[in-house]
Image (cartoon, rainbow, N blue to C red):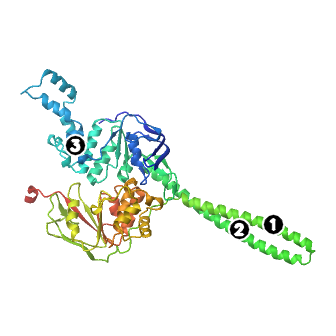
Amino acid sequence: MPKKSVAPSVVIDHLSFSFADGTPVFSDLSLTFPSGFTALMGANGLGKSVLLRLIAGQLTPDTGHISVPSPPVVLPQDLTLQADTTVADLLGVTDVLAAIEELSRTDPAPEPDRVAELLEIIGDQWDAEDSACADLAAHGPVSLPAEPGTLRRAVSTLSGGEAMLVALVGLRRGQPQLTLLDEPSNNLDEGARSRLVESLSDWPGSVIVVTHDRALLRAAEHLVELKPARIRRGRPDGVVSETFGGWDARERVLTERQESAERRLARAQSDLRHEKQAREAEQARASRSAAQGRKAAENMPKILAQTLKRKAEANTADTRATRDARVGDAAAEVGAAREALKELISIDVNLPGTRVGAGTVVVSSIVPELVTGRIVADDGVPLPPGAPLTVRGPECVALSGPNGAGKSTLLEQVLPDASVPFGVLSQRTGSTAGEELDPDRSALENLLDRVPALTQGHARDVLAKLALRGERVHQSYGSLSGGERFRVDLARILAATPAPQLLVLDEPTNDLDLDSVEALASALADFGGALILVSHDTELLETVGVTRTWELVEPVTASEELS
């Protein structure tokens, strides 16, 4: 479709917003979103999703103004829960197709007044069915046949990824001036993610996407990054923004800043050493001068000697004060230079009791009868039902396959055969092992509730290892960002008694910001137990160091069996 002319930008002017409980999110925030494909990024907990809801008009700012080219369209988050919705509904052609079908009836034929109504509904969309199928073929999920029968399928029969891609096709068919998407690539397999990137790169209007997905960030024309104005008592104190002309431009700017900060720190440390050396030299010179003065005073009148002594002591005190001030200034500059350097989040998953010995069998099971797929091992040979499935620690097994292939089903059938304590972190945080975390209680309280054996000090230590520190541990679980809730859930698993020696993580990077993703990948690479990772993030899998892969593929058809 041809790209439609749109207003140049979305403008946020002196925006302030707080939650109902008084927790501030934004204070006097001003920024501009360029036209085209813009990714909104930033650390967990800075309010990216809140800002998107403010732009959408779903929330009202306390003060300030938001200017948009037209009412934005928003992708619903509960597509697969809308049981009565069809693919045609998502594509926006249901009424037109129904009108064409009714108009084509001859027994009984519609009344003249009804004919006029139907013609008005149809307008110039007589090819709606062919057009919808063509758009579905061009931008929809590859797994979904682009044919008339597909248009009548219920959304509830589609995977989450399929439903999301179909809904996006429907949005772009409306030629929106502004589209808002919040983490659209979560839980998508590699093929669906590539389709999403391709679709957004040729979007008919402006689109703002909240994402941590590196593929989407690299594809975006512009990046708007939210950052804490400063960190106070472990939490952001104010939010500011910065706009970049794409991923490469941001990388260049950050590299230049990092190098400049490193040079500043090196200069500051050199100046501090110089000032300390100068102070020591001055102190040595003053000591020698005092000794010489005492010797000379032996041959002077007492009153003159005392006068000279007082003057020398005053000069020495002034010099010492000046040197101390210079050393203090130099030390302060070292501290400021260190603050200017980028501080990376540190995540530590190697808690006591999680390590297992090399070769230790942690899972000994068999290939179950899978309804939707079959397992292919590293050598490409399908594993028949009843074949052994074994995990030995420490190793990392990647479980891959398209959306809907049965990965979760496989884990449900295999994990009961684990011979060591294990922890499972599902895609929906707060629901591990069926236990709901209380959204109104703090992260610390939730952890203590779920792991009663923990002391408060130990619980804070566990949360700190997962980059939740200071006042953040006292914030209600429900008000934390998705990435922070993930870390609370991970803390709950790691702190369990007995400690898990097998971690099963299902799309763990979905809600994590970039620094957290890198920190988690590094931590998992050093984990002393066994891992089963369900992830479409190839960079994560490479960093962690996958030792084996279980791939779920489509079931064999009768013709394939014969061939």
Where is residue 496 shown, x and y percent of the image?
A: 34, 69
Instruction: Give the number of the disc on residue 388.
Output: none
- Image check: 258 left or right of 384? right
Label 1 belongs to which residue? 314
Between residue 120 and residue 400, name the one nearer to us.
120
Between residue 384 and residue 449, name the one nearer to us.
449
For the residues marked 2 and 3, what is the alpha-carbon distance in whole angstroms?
A: 75 Å
Quick check: can you spot residue 267? no
Q: Quadrant of the C terminus?
A: bottom left
Q: Quadrant of the N terminus?
A: top left
Between residue 166 and residue 504, name the one nearer to us.
504
Where is residue 367 shown, x and y percent of the image?
A: 17, 67
Label 3 belongs to which residue? 137
Residue at 23 percent across and 68 percent down: it is 415
Q: Secondary structure at mark 1?
A: helix
What's the residue type where badge 3 is placed? Ala
- Image check: 301 left or right of 468? right
- Image check: 435 left or right of 409? right
Q: Secondary structure at mark 2?
A: helix
Where is residue 85 shown, x and y percent of the image?
A: 21, 42
Instruction: Give the number of the disc on residue 278.
Output: 2
